[in-house]
Image: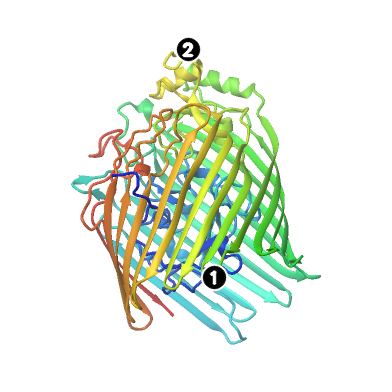
Amino acid sequence: MPRSILMSTCLGVLIAAPAFPQDSAPLVDIITINAHRTTTDGSTLDAQEMASHMTPDTTAVLARLPGVSAISNGALSGQVQYRGLFGSRVNIRLNGRAFESGGPNLMDPPMHYAPAALLEQITIDRGIAPVSAGPGLAGGLDARFKSIDFSESDTLSHATEFSLSGQSIDEGWSRSAMSGIATERFRVYAFGAQESGEDYSAPDTPVAGTRYDRLIYGLGAGFRSGAHEIALSFRRNETGPTGNPQFAMDIRYVDSDFIEFDHDMSLAGWDVSTRISWNEVEHAMNNFSLRPAPASMMRFRETIATVEHQAIALSASRDFAGGALDLGVDHAFATHDVTITNPRNADFFLNNLPDIDMARTGAFLEWQGPLGSWQAELGARLDAHTAEADEASTGPAVPMMPVMLANMFNMSERQWDDVTVDAVARAWHPINDTTLLRVGIARKSRVPTYLERFAWLPTPASAGLADGNTYVGDLELEPETAWIIEAGLDYHAGPAFIRPALFYQQVDNYIQGVAFDGTVGVIDTPVEMVSMMNGDATPLRFANVGAELYGFDGDFGVQLSPTWRLDGAFEFVRAKRRDIDDNLYRVAPASVSLALSHDAEHWSAGIETVWTADQKDVSFTNGEPTSEGYVVWNLNARVNGPLNSVIDLRVDNLLDEAYAPHLSGRNRNSGSAVGLGAPIPAAGRNLGIRLSWSH
């Protein structure tokens, strides 16, 4: 497939017209869940199919947006990639808050906790994330959960919604509900969603170890009086046995709790906000529950990972210099602990990431307002970081070489601190009545994760890289620093619009796996010996290198008639090392999508095609294979029924195309019809139906 085929990976959601901005809209895209279709004069992107998608992976639906791609590491472990960057480099928030995932392989990335059926709105940072959103290298997003708003009177009002869906490809089903009551002074609500599915099938190929099971439920309440408004919420996530064939292990469980407290008030001309949050994760993964058990009892493994995270953020805003001034301080603290065990031998355990404390204290200043004929957002952020690891421990059944590595780690300097500085300037200017120019420059930073810094034992844990390599950390890692420049146009004339953007990012001290030492393949160090015992004679070491990413993306659409509409999106990104002749790992190929939709008074329907190019620019360092391009067609329909009911119908992969997305990873489950190390194919033709009701 030619390189000229461009897009953003889209799984069947039709793209409606975006906001044509008058104030802050050039900086974000807003997806409202289950919203009615908007026009080119509206202020939101249409995402009425978001919750009607039968996939449990919300990232697969978000991938329709310009610059956004989905990395599939399992049904509930999808990661968001933005302009070639993913993992902790993308600033993802839930209810406006960053939080800590549980496992070193990121089997529970942020969107693991955000099923589409429970979301009210997703705000995407276009290009560069503001400093007020917190630290982060690339853009970001904020997923907001559904809740009940205050009413307009003292009369008690109530609201309820319910959905039930099923799909053919994995016999999957889901159900969700939310209900609450409110007056103008208080509100109380409850919500829940449950999803499960069996192994899915690609065309003529069952893909073993891909089942999933997830339950999320919670409560919320709010109270307001005078200048004060208070909100408190609790969420519980219980993930059961879920397959991750891209990894050496599968999820046995992920049990997580979230508590959030908000207080907003007006004080002496300032709007003051307090945000307090706490989350705790307990996570177990193993190599025998959802795949063939090892032949030797000595090879049974189960890893137990935990994290506890607390955060507080204080901010204040007011009118200033013709615009809005925001000031804020925030603090976050987390403790991670990971232990590898053998369930068949109580004397075998390695506390390979031992009680690692990581803290960050930050402050920011941000102003948005007019600068002459331009509108601008200017911000700066300062963060102080600390990290410290406890001593590693091993059991009496652990071989001598890993014990030696643990002792070497315990004798090393396991404390680190540093300060990072971020600065962002974004501006937009109407050239004429139809065209808006957008420009942005930024200095953004990211500190190493606990895994990248403190991993002393070579294991395949890599925060979701899923490349089959074993990794060790580096205590001397420096923070990443990205220098970013971008420019774009928002063109809107009559029934048509197009929003292209160009970007360039130079990343200094980019953290990338490199050869452990200069004698690759020569097993002459304890790390290489232990790595060879784990099946990899050429381990990688996280190190600082130079990188650059550049490309373009955008979306477009035209209202063909009062009832017919054509929309699309495109994406191209080139990501490579600056220090050697190599490419960055697992970067989305170029692609383009087109969607034709018809809206009637009580029903709508659409057809979409997604063209994805070959990916030949792959990472030699990570042993990344190339991938072939493909074309996929999808259908969808919606019928508005009686009593506020809605029926959604979908056919994904209409022609039952056999293909393997470049970002889907390689199979490591020996019990699958998919060969070991082979690309994991996408699902075949899938029929889905969803019934929803609200009152």
Question: Which quadrant is home to the C terminus?
Answer: bottom left
Quarter assignment of residue 360: top right
Residue 9 visible in rendering: yes
Q: Pick whichever, 495 or 141, lies toward us.
A: 495
Packing grade of label 2 (10 A; few <14, some 14-19, many >=20) is: few
The residue to which callout 1 is attached is 433
The image quarter in which residue 245 lies: top left
Q: Does label 2 or label 1 sit earlier along the sequence?
A: 1
Q: Nearer the viewer, residue 234 or 691?
A: 691
x then y, percent, for residue 332: 66, 48
228 shown above or below 570: below
Instruction: Give the residue type that dot 1 points to.
Output: Asp
For badge 2, the amino acid type reads: Asp
Which is closer to the viewer, label 2 or label 1?
1
Instruction: Inspect this view and state whether residue 11 appears.
Output: no
Q: How is the image coloured?
A: rainbow
| Left-right relation of 17 to 172 | right
